[in-house]
Amino acid sequence: MLLSHDHIRTTVETYLARHPHEREQLGGLLDALERPTDIASRSTSTGHVTCGAIVIDPLGRVLHVHLASGKVLAPGGHTEPEDESLAAAALRELYEETGIPPQAVAPWSGYEAVPFDVDVHDIDAHPGRGEPGHRHFDLRFLFRLHATSEAPVVLQEEEVGGIEWRPVDRVTSPSLRVKLLRLMRETEPQTANASALIYNDRGEYLLHLRDYFPGRIWEPGMWSLLGGGREPQDVTLEHTVRRELQEEAGLDIADLTLFGTEYASDDAGASVPVAIYAGRWNGDPRELRLTEGVMLAWFAPDDLHRLRIADTTRDLVMRHAASCPAKVSSTAPGIGFSSHGECRLASSQGTVLNVVGVHLYLERPDGTVLLGLRHPDSVFAPSTWHALAGHCEQESAITCLIREAREEAGLRIEPQDVELVHVVHHIDDAGDRPRIGLFFRARTWSGEPELREPDKCTQWKFWEPAALPDDLVSYTRVAIEGIRAGRLYSEMGWA
């Protein structure tokens, strides 16, 4: 038997008691609950309820599934007659799509029977399946993944192509992302650590010699990775590792990639998850401002046996090095790494992969140009004006541009209305990874800029190109000046 209107209405009203400001935007759902049609049935063409599972792992990452349609969303779907509750429907969908069983997760405290978020969105018609256009009222329930659970993944192959654990600030749904960021700031962080596996183009790893203070610090007098424990202000563990790098060594790594998760034992013998972020840096550790420990130094994997180092740290470095197609050793200086933790053969000039950034050049008929003011807590360029931009993921540059414009500002752009107008090849500081900034003009678009990601951008504003703000990202200024002058290419930061 399908879930009753009374159960759904009670759940929705309980949610609105916590979020009264959302009553107007959920008016369609409330109206549907007053109709005699069965809102729990997928055959109700005017609109029906769906249920989603928001699963957070011990490292604070959120589970997403890659659908066959190309969308990346949290697990979820339609209710079924056997579902005893809306939350149970979300758990069933989680299991069907990913193979993660209900016993591997637990409801987030305070959200056992109340949705964490409710989203209303339109679904296009599918004439081939006899489905008219309709609405989904998606009730999303929040769960923790048990720290001890390995949660084996068995995908629903006809619909799901893969899963991905994303940090909170990269959750695809804007409304959900804002709520999760607020929750993480208000909730006492789980005990978790983050460490940095830093390597250079010679195939060496940066290790930190700890102070010898037995009983006061972890692994005293041993070589280890830079890093530390999560603190309340850290929204994600990437924020944790970046803060620790800055505090311990004044070190800023342009790109950090999650390499894996390790588990260590604290002084009480409890298991503590450690997120390992890998990043490339070619600087001299003797020039860093070390505030903790004795020293920093580069070591080749073959030299680790001579050091006083924990077995887990040695194994981690060796596992990273073993992912290379060729063995890294102190006698093989020509071996280097890519930013994804995979080895590559380096040329004599130290060939590296470049980061590709995609930028929107949006110019109104009056000649003013759109810029956004970055959030004060942004890792890159805080409280600074910048073009709407994002890193190119596993997608084409134009696809990335269209996605970022929609996610960040609610703008809709069609591929045929986009043209490349400038390229900036730049490097910020010596040893940093080179970057290629692609600037695309949108000839036409629909919508007005709105704050879809207030945790990243606090204001959108159109500026006169002749009176750009002083606090503007430098390469963005160069690009705008180049576009206005009709130049296609610029370089910055190269000696």
Image (spheres, grey):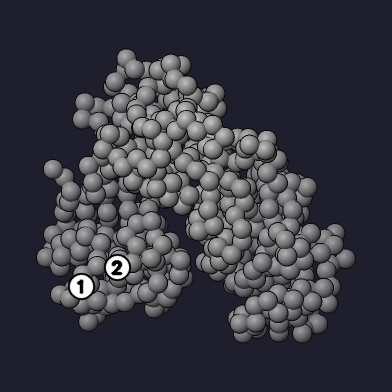
Q: What residue did someone put label 1 on? A: 468
Quadrant in the rendering for residue 125 = bottom right
Residue 6 placement (x, y as % from top left): 83, 77
Q: Residue at x 39, y 66 (%)?
A: 375
Tell me, yes or no, if residue 319 can be seen here.
no
In the image, is residue 466 above or below residue 296? below
Q: Is residue 345 left or right of residue 456?
A: left
Q: Secondary structure at mark 2?
A: strand
Residue 99 placement (x, y as % from top left): 71, 44
**299 or 134: nearer the eye?**
299
Type of the residue with mark 1: Leu
Q: Residue at x 68, y 49 (%)?
A: 145
Q: Residue at x 58, y 52 (%)?
A: 60
Q: Nearer the N terminus, badge 1 or badge 2? A: 2
In the image, is residue 179 above or below residue 149? below
Tell which residue pokes out farthest to the left in this image. Answer: 485
Image quadrant for the C terminus?
Answer: top left
Quadrant in the rendering for residue 200 = top left
Q: Is residue 216 left or right of residue 469?
A: right
Q: Residue at x 42, y 30 (%)?
A: 209
Image quadrant for the N terminus?
Answer: bottom right
Residue 219 placement (x, y as % from top left): 53, 31
Q: What residue did someone put label 2 on? A: 385
Q: Secondary structure at mark 1?
A: loop
In the image, is residue 106 above or below residue 416? above
**44 or 112: nearer the eye?**
112
Q: Is residue 396 left or right of residue 308?
A: left
Question: Mark 1 touching mark 2, by CB under 8 A?
Answer: yes
